[in-house]
Image (tube, rainbow, N blue to C red):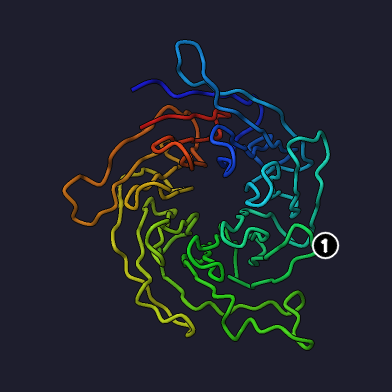
């Protein structure tokens, strides 16, 4: 196996990364000075280009400064040069990577750190954010304020993601150890002259999955199997949940754990399903590794396929290339972005 392509961003610890849905060799990277505890942040735009001997190499195209640390980002699904970022000061910013310096849009509604942001790949004019303030907010980039607020959990919401199959479904995970699925079509979300979700947030999940006795830090929807999700938590476990038996419309507790994937030595901080294979899952952990798993229960292959252990600090992000099957990017508090083919 060839060594990974590496890009270093000295002084800025990474928090998240994402491949462009429009360009097969472009990535965006969210980072923070001083490990995100205090100080500014940077949005890095990176290209994967051919290097000496034909091996790919990473090139920093440009970066944007922010006043507070950046915790997550998402590429627009509607505009090839737009990226939205989540910040420690509670703000959300929209950037045009062809411009210099300032963001082209700023929203300030969350009262605590914004920890995740996700752009719907079906409803391409809509993105969702989650915060330590317990709320999840839905936005359109041309609107001056959020269009919907969910009081999703009573404590920090680490991640909120649109379903890649049904644009009305959003899943969340939290400090409280649960995964939740919200259906924006349900009667609890009726809007009218007398309803205002901004001042009276909605909170009824159609499904609550008691996923862990510890904090659930990350989740992802399977790209091929609707209502199958993966979760990663502080108890070092990644788990696969089958929620297909649930009747959407009632508020209930449930979900079947299809498989558990023990092996990480510390908390599982981020995970992502492959966009090309239904049973391939990448997990990033505070144990400084990224691991690749085969999630077929009782399958012919052992669950653990590969361990990437080149990082020297917490691995906080992992993302599969949308275009190049098997290509994986990882990022870490060691200020290194790695791109590899495990």
Percent position of residue 6, x then y: 52, 23
- The residue sitting at 44% across, 42% down in the picture is 284
Percent position of residue 107, x then y: 79, 57
Instruction: Return the residue nearer the eye: 289 or 267.
Output: 289
Q: Residue furthest top?
A: 53
Relative to 102, 206 lies left or right: left
Percent position of residue 212, x then y: 40, 63
Q: Is residue 86 shown above or below 200? A: above
On the rendered image, what quadrant is the C terminus found in? Answer: top left
Q: Residue furthest bottom?
A: 194
Percent position of residue 215, x then y: 48, 59
Q: Residues within 10 Å of mark 1 (few under 14, many from 20)?
A: few
On the rendered image, what quadrant is the N terminus found in? Answer: top left
Q: Is residue 204 shown above or below 124? A: below
- The residue sitting at 42% across, 39% down in the picture is 287
- The residue sitting at 58% across, 41% down in the picture is 20
Whether residue 8 appears in this view of the structure is: yes
- The residue sitting at 42% across, 56% down in the picture is 223
Whether residue 131 appears in this view of the structure is: no
Instruction: Return the residue nearer the eye: 308 or 53.
Output: 53
Q: Which residue is mark 1?
A: 144
Instruction: Return the residue nearer the eye: 43 or 244.
Output: 244
């Amino acid at each position: 196996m060839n060594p990974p392509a590496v890009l270093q961003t000295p002084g800025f610890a990474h928090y998240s990364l994402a491949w462009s849905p429009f360009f097969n060799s472009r990535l965006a990277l969210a980072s923070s000075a001083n490990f995100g505890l205090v100080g500014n942040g940077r949005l890095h735009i990176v290209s994967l280009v051919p290097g000496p001997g034909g091996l790919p190499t990473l090139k920093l195209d440009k970066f944007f400064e922010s006043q507070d640390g950046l915790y997550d980002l998402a590429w627009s699904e509607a505009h090839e040069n737009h990226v939205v970022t989540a910040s420690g000061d509670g703000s959300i910013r929209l950037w045009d990577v062809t411009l210099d310096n300032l963001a082209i849009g700023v929203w300030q509604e969350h009262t605590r750190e914004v920890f995740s942001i996700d752009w719907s790949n079906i409803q391409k004019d809509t993105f969702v954010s989650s915060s330590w303030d317990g709320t999840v907010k839905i936005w359109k980039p041309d609107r001056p304020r959020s269009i919907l607020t969910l009081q999703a959990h009573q404590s920090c919401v680490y991640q909120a993601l649109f379903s890649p199959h049904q644009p009305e479904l959003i899943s969340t995970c939290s400090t409280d150890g649960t995964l939740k699925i919200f259906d924006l079509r349900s009667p609890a979300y009726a809007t009218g002259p007398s309803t205002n979700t901004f001042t009276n947030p909605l909170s009824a999940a159609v499904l609550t999955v008691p996923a862990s006795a510890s904090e659930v830090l990350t989740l992802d929807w399977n790209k091929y199997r609707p209502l199958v999700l993966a979760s990663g938590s502080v108890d070092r476990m990644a788990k696969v949940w089958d929620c297909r038996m649930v009747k959407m419309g009632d508020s209930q507790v449930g979900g079947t754990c299809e498989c558990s994937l023990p092996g990480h030595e510390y908390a599982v901080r981020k995970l992502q399903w492959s966009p090309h294979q239904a049973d391939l899952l990448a997990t990033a952990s505070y144990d400084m590794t990224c691991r690749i798993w085969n999630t077929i229960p009782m399958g012919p292959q052992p669950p653990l396929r590969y361990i990437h252990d080149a990082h020297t600090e917490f691995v906080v992000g992992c993302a599969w290339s949308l275009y190049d099957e098997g290509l994986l990017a990882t990022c870490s508090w060691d200020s290194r972005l790695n791109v590899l083919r495990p």
